[in-house]
Image (tube, rainbow, N blue to C red):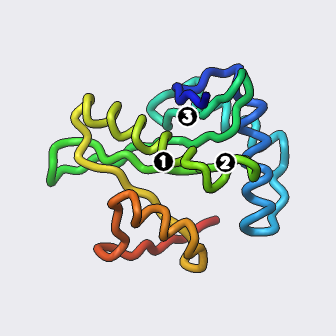
Amino acid sequence: MISIRKATPGDAPSIIAFQQAMAMETEGLELRSEVITKGVMAVFRDENKGVYYVAEENGTVVASLMITFEWSDWRNSNIWWFQSVYVIPEYRRKGVFRMMYDHVRQEGMAQGIAGLRLYVEAENTRAQKTYEAMGMNGGHYRTFEWMA
């Protein structure tokens, strides 16, 4: 049975490995271990940066995601952003992300969040269909970025 929980520093090796796998799968990018390790550990040291959640089955972490926070002055509340979502291949299309989404949504609602957001690559239509099936929509905003 899969359970969802807030991640602990002991989950960092799985989260780091997942982020490296995701970067390679989605962008053909090899993340430097020392950089991603410092980045993941920074979140555990400072929850203002974000919070990780993991999905676990029989003591094995099978998925992770990070929530970051955006203050909305319009709503006088935080919006939680899903980031760094990764589900190991053999657990994909089995409802793991939906379980994580539902868990995070319930926690967020209990804390008074204004909503949930995420961004997805324009070509990732499979993920977009998953998000739409969960009641999310992508029609309101477009995301622009500058990355160093």
Amino acid type of the residue tagged 1 in the rendering: Arg
Vertical relation: 89 (above or below) 52: below
Q: How many angstroms separate mark 2 from mark 3 (CA)?
A: 13 Å
Q: Is residue 60 left or right of residue 63?
A: right
Q: Which SS class for mark 1? A: helix
Q: Which residue is mark 1?
A: 98
Depth check: give the residue in front, 1 or 88: 1
Answer with mark 2 or mark 3, whichever residue precedes in sequence.
3
Instruction: Find residue 10 and report its horizontal and vertical position in percent.
Output: 71, 20
Q: Is residue 134 left or right of residue 12?
A: left
Q: Which label lies toward us, 2 or 1?
A: 1
Amino acid type of the residue tagged 3 in the rendering: Tyr
Q: Which residue is mark 2?
A: 87
Residue 53 numbered tag: none
> Looking at the image, which residue is at 44% across and 32% down?
48
> Looking at the image, which residue is at 35% across and 48% down?
70
Q: How many angstroms separate mark 3 from mark 1 (CA)?
A: 16 Å
Q: Which SS class for mark 2? A: strand
Amino acid type of the residue tagged 2 in the rendering: Val
Depth check: give the residue in front, 39 or 125: 125
Vertical relation: 30 (above or below) 52: below
Q: Quadrant of the N terminus?
A: top right
- The image quadrant that residue 52 belongs to is top right
Q: Which residue is mark 3?
A: 52
Q: How many angstroms separate mark 2 from mark 1 (CA)?
A: 11 Å
Vertical relation: 22 (above or below) 125: above
